[in-house]
Image (cartoon, rainbow, N blue to C red):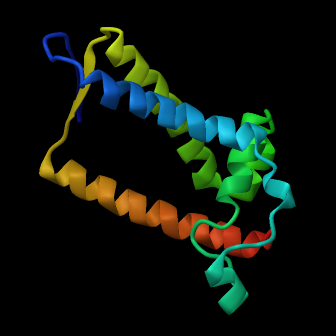
Amino acid sequence: MRLALQHDLRTLEPIIGWGLAAGCFGLLGAAAFFPFGTLPKLCAFLLLTDLPCLTCGMTRSWVALVHGDVFGAIAWNPLGTALCLTALAGGVYAAARQLGAPALRVSTSALERRFIRFGIVLAVALNWGFVFSAGRV
C-alpha cells in the first residue's frame, strides 16, 4: 500500500466539496444535539426477530463519542465509533481540500484489496458478534 500527496489535482466543485464537509459535520452535530434517547426503538430487524441488527447501537455510539464518552461509545458499537471518527476525518479532509490542501492518494495491489475486503467482512462479523453478545439493545 502506498500513500502519496498530489498537489496538482484540482479540488471538487465548491458545492460538492463544502457539501461533503457540511454533511459530515452535520451528522456529528445531530449526534451531539438531537435527543435520540427519547425515541422508541425503530429497528425493524430488532422488532421482528428480537435480535440486534448489524448496526444496533451505532447511533448511541456516535452520541456517546461526541459527548466525550469514548469507552461508552466502544461498548455500544465499536464499528460505529470507528465510523464516527471516519466522518470527522472526512469532514476535515473535505474542508481542507476546498482550502487548497493536497489530495491524499492511496494505491493498492490486487492482493492488498483482497485482504482489505476480507478484513472489512471480518470486522463487521466480529462487531455483530460483539453487539449480539453484549446484549445492550
Q: Residue furthest right?
A: 38
Which residue is depicted at the point 70% across and 73% down? 42
Using the image, determine if residue 102 lies above or below residue 61.
above
Can you say which quadrant of the picture contains the C terminus? bottom right
Rendered location of residue 91, percent (x, y): 47, 28
The answer to whether residue 88 is left or right of residue 10 is right
Where in the figure is residue 30, as x and y percent of width and height? 67, 41
Q: Quadrant of the N terminus?
A: top left
Residue most extreme to the bottom? 49
Residue at image coords 84%, 56%: 37
74 lies above or below 95: below
Image check: 72 left or right of 129?
right
Up the image or down, 103 lies above or below 33; here it is above
In which image quadrant can residue 55 be found? bottom right
- At horizontal 81% and vertical 63% (from top left) the residue drawn is 39
The one nearer the camera, 9 or 21, is: 21
Q: Position of residue 25 (x, y in %)?
A: 56, 31
Is 51 placed above or below 121 here? below
The answer to which image quadrant residue 129 occupies is bottom right
130 or 104, which is in the foreground?
Answer: 104
Q: Which corner quadrant of the image does residue 29 belong to? A: top right
Q: Nearer the viewer, residue 65 or 38?
A: 38
Q: Residue furthest front?
A: 15
Task: Left or right? Give the position of 63 relative to 102.
Answer: right
The residue that appears at 51% across and 36% down in the rendered structure is 24
Q: In this rendering, would 4 be left or right of 65? A: left
> How many circles with numbers are drawn on the protein?
0
Residue 81 locus on image (x, y percent): 63, 46
